[in-house]
Image (tube, helix red, strand yellow):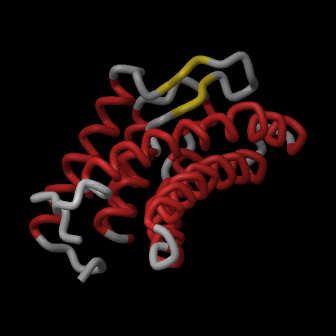
Amino acid sequence: MKGSLSVRNIVIAGVLGAVAILLGVTRLGYIPVPTAAGNATIMHIPAIIGGIMQGPIVGAIVGIIFGVSSFLNATVPLFKDPLVAILPRLFIGVVAWLVYVGIRRKSEYLAIGTAAFLGTLTNTVLVLTMAVVRGYMGAEVAWTVALTSGIPEAVVGTVVTLAVVLSWKQIGKGKKSRISED
């Protein structure tokens, strides 16, 4: 069952969480952009992959690891607030899983791509909403960040997630992956 916490789920959550930490600590997960956000990120991608591949619990675990890493490595006051840095990240993998499960019977490719796109937008929308609610930025600035950073992040997140998940599942190759349960 995708909702249970098996040894496999714990291991995959740990590995994807380690990838998120590595992306944060090395700063490889942050792409400098000339916007109010300062950086576009790809650090949410492991949470999306965890949600799609292993379900909402793994997606939430990887999301919280991403959030804690973001909080501990914060260079701006906005992300030194756990309600901005951690709380929104819990929902990235959960939303990705819900979208994937809702669409996968129609098309596996569409389900993965849509889950990745909406999982990324979940990160963007919830973080920016919390930033506005907590008074770190105005709504106008949040909209600008969402459009200038959020949309490109969603496109990059979709492409990378599709590549990783399709490789993991080995879709279209006529054989099952040893690491995929599907």
Relative to 63, residue 135 above or below: above
x, y (%) of residue 66? 40, 45
Q: Nearer the viewer, residue 106 or 120?
A: 106
Above or below residue 144? Residue 11 is: below
Pinpoint residue 116: horizontal percent, then vertical percent. 51, 53
Residue 107 higher or lower than 84, as above or below:
below
Q: Is residue 122 found left or right of 50 in the rendered image?
A: right
Quadrant where the image shows the N terminus: bottom left
Q: Position of residue 138 (x, y in %)?
A: 86, 40
Extreme bottom residue here? 1
Question: Quick check: 128 left or right of 182?
Answer: right
Q: Quadrant of the C terminus?
A: bottom left
Asked whether 111 or 95 is in front, the reply is 111
Q: Residue at (44%, 46%) from the top-left corner?
A: 67
- The residue nearer to you, when weighing 57 against 161, is 161
Residue positioned 26% across, 57% down in the render: 169
Nearer to the camera, 122 or 133: 122
